[in-house]
Image (cartoon, rainbow, N blue to C red):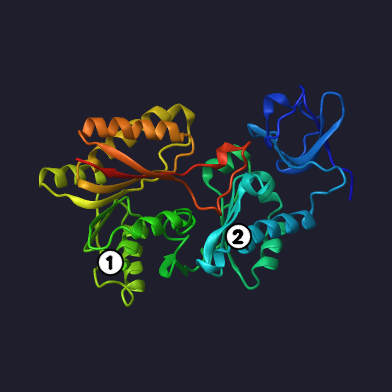
Amino acid sequence: MSELPVVRLKNAWRSTHPWIFQKLVEKPPVRPKPGSIVDVVGVDGEWIGRGFYNGHSRIALRMLEGDPDVQVDATWFARRIADAVALRRDVLRLDEVGDAWRVVHSEGDGLSGLVVDRYADLLVVEFFSAGMFRHRDWIYDALRAQFPGCRFHAFADEHVQKQESFDFRGSEPAAPAIITEHGIRFRADPAGAHKTGFFADQRENRQWLSQLVAGKRVLDLCCNTGGFAVYAAVRGAEEVVGIDIDEAVIDIAKGNVKLNMPFASGVRPRFVQADVFPWLRDAANNGESYDVVVLDPAKMTRDREQVIPALKKYLDMNKLALGVVKPGGLFATFSCTGLVSEEQFLDMLRRAAFYAGRTVQVLRIAGAGADHPFLAQVPESRYLKAVFCRVLD
């Protein structure tokens, strides 16, 4: 292999975090292209590691390899992706649960800037870094080796492309896939709904809550493609209502009900396209109440400056949702905003309960499934907060 460009750090660096920010990095005399693989040396000239360099990004270096004898090449990617798949298949045994799970979870699998989700034969590849995008052919080859005959849907959010300085219009829209988890079927449509097609991260949370809904009235707020609502119908709920503002995901949710009706209890969820804020106010004014209420809104912000406004919106939403929970009922509330910590989210819930005049008993705190691992030194990879409560009065 030809000699790699060398990037030098300005200050001593002893962190095990894979990100090194621009202010710590000397600008090379000849700048490598964004996403190039480079050798990194310290201020003393000692070799530190190997990773992606991007002089246009706030994250100038994404460290990948700490062994000087190991090259970051196609074989390296094949080995890392094989290790990630082995965790899911051999350790977590997710093939026994279903055919929809996260294959690669960025830093949690030692592949900073890459997320891959599996939906049956469809692999959804999301690029968060110029380095992963630049070496996408190696990634596709490694994934094909693990999932022979698979299809790809690949994309990168516009804000990521701007931050990382690369252009990608995305692959041709892929046809949806029909997946199964815990015996329940869903249509995953990355081209027509949520960016990856389906929220696999909530799999265990859907399963846990669904064991408690038999004979209950269930309200699924921000229901997206109907995950919690469909589980509730299949598991014997007496009535299920799903609310979402997006007409496209409501249509997919209705289709997901049809996929499961031969096996369901006979209860067909009712989906309503509406903004949850006025809908909840009207429901409370009309004296509506539910035995089980699920609140799973979309990500509120990616901007650290907007965390306080995001928490305010969570507060308002949770306060309204608590107002339609029957005394003794269950309330499941979620946040997928990574910048909001678990401590902040629980404090928001405390305040929401106070303003709603309800007593909330926390039963369980969870997060994403085990196929979304994070390294202890990289807490940024942990994003989903799940709080299951009982509303006592």
Q: Is residue 306 above or below residue 167?
A: above
Q: Earlier in the sequence, mark 2 or mark 1?
A: 2
Label 2 sits on what residue type? Arg
Mark pair 2, 1: CA separation: 30 Å
Residue 249 visible to an observer of this rendering: no
Residue named by callout 2: 88
Residue 108 percent location from the top left of the image = 62, 46
Residue name at image x 45 percent, y 58 percent = 198
Residue 310 percent location from the top left of the image = 38, 33
Please tell me how crowded label 1 is: few (under 14), some (14-19), or many (20+) other residues with Cα within 10 Å. Answer: many
Residue name at image x 58 percent, y 48 percent = 373
Can you name the residue that lies furthest to the left here? 286
Q: Is mark 1 on a helix, strand or loop?
A: loop
* Depth order, front residue of 160/108: 108
Residue name at image x 30 percent, y 30 percent = 351
- Contact between marks 2 and 1 (CB within 8 A): the answer is no
Q: Is mark 2 on a helix, strand or loop?
A: helix
Residue named by callout 1: 236
Can you name the residue that lies furthest to the top here? 11
